Image (spheres, grey):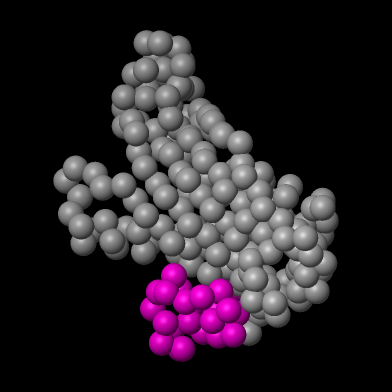
Amino acid sequence: MKKSLFFLIALTFLFQSCAKVFYAPDARYLAGTHKIIAIVPPKVSIAPRKKVDAAALIEQQKSESINFQREMYSWMLKRKMQGTIFVDIQDVETTNAKLAAAGFQDAGLLTPTDLARVLNVDGVLTSNYSLSKPMSEGAAIAMAVIAGWWAPTNEAVVSLSIHDSGTERMIWNYDHKLSSSLGSPARLVDELMRQASREMPYFNNGL
């Protein structure tokens, strides 16, 4: 019983809905002209929870924004090193330092054109993460033991967008909803990017 329970606790499942993808007619062409892109800190919203005050929630959202930005950068950098992505990615320290030096504390207040100008890049990858927690991990484990199925403990609605600095247009957008059990930012980003990379024009397997 202990081994079975440990297996249930350690195991993580991911449930997905169908993604919605937008391509500008010239998305692949414009992406091919990009030499370097930047991943800006995403906008993160977390559903209010009991015993968590508003100030603490705001700080958590800021912390998770940087976590998601770093995870996305690490994921794409690894694929760059593997040769599956052809564009260079500005490191997040440089991105965030340039934003801070320009006096911008919240990248979400800037237009993609402003971001590209400040960061001196050809394309900007922006994102939004809306996070909620429909069931506690303890309740999920109990449900798995009693009913034999694993309920999601975390849900995320994510939107990724690429903007071209030259045309000042959004050339690609990817909207997806994911639900996971006992997940983490790293796992969520890994699954999200694995799915999105099949459609993202910077990857060699894109359109």
Please tell me which residue is depicted at 67% across the width and 59% down the height of the picture: 172
Q: How many numbered markers are drawn?
A: 0
Q: Along the line of sight, which residue is nearer the eye, 142 or 21?
A: 21
Residue 70 in the image: x percent, y percent? 53, 63
Q: Is residue 45 visible?
A: yes
Q: From which residue to which does the magenta span run? A: 90-118
Residue 43 in the image: x percent, y percent? 43, 62
* 180 to the left or right of 125: left
Main secondary structure found in the magenta portion: helix
Whether residue 182 is situated above or below residue 101 in the rendered picture: above
Please tell me which residue is depicted at 31% across the width and 24% down the height of the picture: 139
> Residue 106 falls in which quadrant of the image?
bottom left
Residue at far front of view:
25
Whether residue 182 is situated above or below residue 199 in the rendered picture: above
Whether residue 113 is situated above or below residue 84 in the rendered picture: below
Q: Along the line of sight, which residue is nearer the eye, 178 or 9?
A: 178
Residue 95 in the image: x percent, y percent? 55, 77
Q: Is residue 82 visible?
A: no
Decide whether residue 142 is among the magenta residues.
Answer: no
Residue 8 in the image: x percent, y percent? 46, 22
